[in-house]
Image (tube, rainbow, N blue to C red):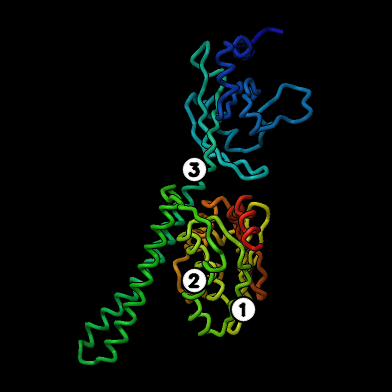
Amino acid sequence: MIPTEENTDRELVRELVRVAHPLWRTILATMREGVLVVDRRMTVLVQNPAATEIFPPPPISSRPLRLIDLTRDPALHEGFQQALGQGASVELRFELRRGEPRTFQVRIAPLRIASDTPQAALGVFVEITALERLERVRRDFFANLSHELRTPLAAILAYVEMLQEIGLDDPEHVRRCLDGLFRQAQRLHALVRDITDLAEIESGATVLSLEALPLRALVEDVLALIQPRAEGRGIAIVNEIPEEIQVLADPLRLTQILQNLLDNAVKFNRPNGCVWIRARRLGEHLEVSIADTGIGIPPADQPRIFERFYRSEKSRSRETGGSGLGLAIVKHLVQLHGGEIRVRSEPGMGSEFTFSLKAAPEPRVAQGATSADAMTNE
């Protein structure tokens, strides 16, 4: 068989790969980026461990591994062929749909070893799944924020225009406009406050001041703020937390958690419904649950209700007010305390939010004090 120029080039590339310096082999093995090198016949010459994790080779292969054995993505094949045929670098976006979807930025460069014609092409796969997810979250956040700001601002402008038209000669009409302005200003204030709180918590700037707190008494303080609204809708709130339960938490932040959850339990409840607050000790932790007889949450919405600005049944949620950030703040505050939060809900049957916190250490009675008490009792 007469050796051709193509066969010679391929053998040269393989020989260079075979005798590669151990340093380069170590670098390839430790890279997080996937590296693939193919020759002009699309035979795979180099596949580092990261690339093997992206493209597992077939279990049985009786011939040299080729690119088509690893992936049939047409854009990827075209990118390697373009780098080999035109001798120019190629950049493309590659989506791996096997299992959990992943996205890669791929740069493919021609390799020239013994001539001006590329003998091989090198592709580097940089995963950008997390970056794209963060970018999507950022876009959604600003889109939702602008929407939430637009509604109260539009109402404020409308009230101001009405005041300009009617002047001050109609006191009753002026009073209604001022009441509307006050409500919308309160809504804006709540939104800005919640955004500030969430940004502070997510940045790690929030520092907890942990104390041993009587949980039942703390819940009663929160209920004193919520009770008027509950009574207005005929909703009964039952505090079933035992007197002796003590929790280790930041009083201000725990109040914020309870107020958000109890407020939602009343807000999304049915008229003449009920809310129960319960707690139990599980070893060194407490489990606190708030259950209601409300409208419930559709199963498709439940995995997302702790996202910023996410609303289940959006039209009804906006009628009830709120910034749409309450549950996101609750989730972060619970996690900041070292706990977790979950929801169990059925549409039309109500919801139950359960979160965990650290239990306060039980007080120890000194042996000397016990003896003294016994002598006193005698």
Identify the residue at image location x=61%, y=38%: 74
> CA gap, disc 3 to disc 1?
44 Å
Q: Nearer the viewer, residue 15 or 248?
A: 248
Q: Tell me: 66 left or right of 24.
A: right
Q: Type of residue at label 2?
A: Asp
Q: Secondary structure at mark 3?
A: helix
Instruction: Check contact, mark 3 vs mark 1: CB within 8 A.
Output: no
Q: Secondary structure at mark 1?
A: strand
Q: Nearer the viewer, residue 213 or 302?
A: 213
Q: Which residue in the structure is indicated by mark 2? A: 221
Q: Type of residue at label 1?
A: Cys
User: Which disc, if any, is residue 131?
Assistant: 3
Give x and y (percent) for residue 4. Answer: 63, 11
Q: Is residue 340 something that shows in the picture?
A: no
Q: Which residue in the structure is indicated by mark 1? A: 274
The mark nearer the N terminus, 3 or 1, is 3
Q: Nearer the viewer, mark 1 or mark 2?
A: 2
Identify the residue at image location x=49%, y=71%: 221
> CA gap, disc 1 to disc 2?
18 Å
The mark nearer the N terminus, 1 or 2, is 2
Give x and y (percent) for residue 168. Answer: 20, 88
Identify the residue at image location x=51%, y=54%: 332
The quadrant of the rendering that contains the N terminus is top right
Local crowd at mark 2 within 10 Å, few (<14), some, or many (≥20)? few
Give x and y (percent) for residue 87. Answer: 49, 23
The quadrant of the rendering that contains the C terminus is bottom right
Q: Secondary structure at mark 2?
A: helix
Q: Is residue 339 something that shows in the picture?
A: yes
